[in-house]
Image (cartoon, helix red, strand yellow):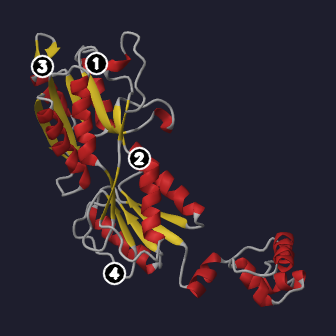
Amino acid sequence: MNRTNPTPTMKDVAAEAGVALGTVSKVVNGLPVGESYRVRVEEAIKKLNYQVNSYAQGLKLNKTRTVALLIPNTTEPFYGSLVHHINISLLKRQYRMLLCCTDLHGGLEQEYVNMVQQNKVDGIIGLTYDPNLKVDAGTPYVSIDRSAGPGVPCVASDNFAGGQLAAEKLADLGCRKVAFLRTGSSLANEPNKRKAGFENGCLSRKLSYEMKIISDGEPYEEFDRFLISHMRDGKLEFDGLFCVTDSLAYYVLKVLRRLGLRVPEDVQVIGFDGIRHLGFHDYVCSTIVQPVEEIAEMCVTLLLQENMPVKPPLVCLPVAYAYGGTTAEGREGDAPLSRQ
């Protein structure tokens, strides 16, 4: 190795291993060589502490082995879990993730897309809010929860089935008058189907229901006012609530307790997402669980699979119910239902 240049090169590895430079290149790039040559090269790499220049390697192969993920934020537990599992799925394939937190800002989403395309990422996965987002046709793109137009696969949970399951579960647990509480974007997206599924479940089980829907950015105190307006003589007119996310359910649970209501004795609550305390302990509430790991794996598979002749416009993954302490099946000594 050249003593004036302490950083070992591929030529140094070849000299140390006693093989041709092309043999080292094949080993580094995962191409087949004779077993004895491979062992010698790997031993030389280890001895010299040779580091592969993945950027230069990517330029040569016209790949950077980098994928950009556009996500609203990482403070929301569901988004944080999605980031974690997408990163794991990429690492398994020896890809790196470039994380772009957009803070629900449509203009920032386009800026990030332009930036990562200039950096020649191998693809983009996006959970975005800009309906006019422009991604170059030559950049592989997979959307989460929102259709991004023809030719762009969208991966989502079965939100309609999840909403219906929540209504049916509340009915099975004895509820007779329920409410649907939602905050979210007015843009067309898959999560909006939770409302239609819940309505369908209520109608099929003859459940009386009302809805309180606010847009992103409106204060959660709107839900306080809604619930207070339905209090009569210290009791809530509803005996069941379906909250469109677990984060909203967590907020509503605090409101109910401030009103002196017991959960689940006075009112039962079901959320949506499958958020757990500290990421892996008990569910924060009884909930419709999104298969986050499967969503992440499907996004990465669709993005990187080059030999797929036609990529599906929508992949809808099944959801499941999980008991989390805010519904009635855990009372009176009954064993909690962890899944259904």
Contact? badges 4 and 2 (CB < 8 Å): no
Q: Is residue 199 left or right of residue 327?
A: left
**Crowding at label 4, few (<14), some or many (≥20) Cα neighbours within 10 Å?**
few
Q: Which residue is mark 2?
A: 291
- The residue mark sitting in front, 4 or 2, is 2
Using the rendered image of the protein, determine whether residue 150 is visible from the camera's viewpoint. yes
Q: Dot 4: what SS?
A: loop
Give the x, y percent position of residue 65.
Answer: 55, 73
Q: Which residue is mark 4?
A: 137
Q: Is residue 205 left or right of residue 278?
A: left
* Closest to the observer, 236 or 331: 331
Q: Which residue is mark 3?
A: 237
Name which residue type carries label 2: Pro
Name which residue type carries label 4: Ala
Contact? badges 2 and 1 (CB < 8 Å): no
Residue at 39%, 45% (x, y): give it: 78
Q: Which residue is mark 1?
A: 257
**Crowding at label 2, few (<14), some or many (≥20) Cα neighbours within 10 Å?**
some
Look at the image and tell me in which quarter the C terminus lies: top left
Residue 185's place in the image compared with 28, above or below, is: above
- The residue mark sitting in front, 1 or 3, is 3
Name which residue type carries label 1: Arg
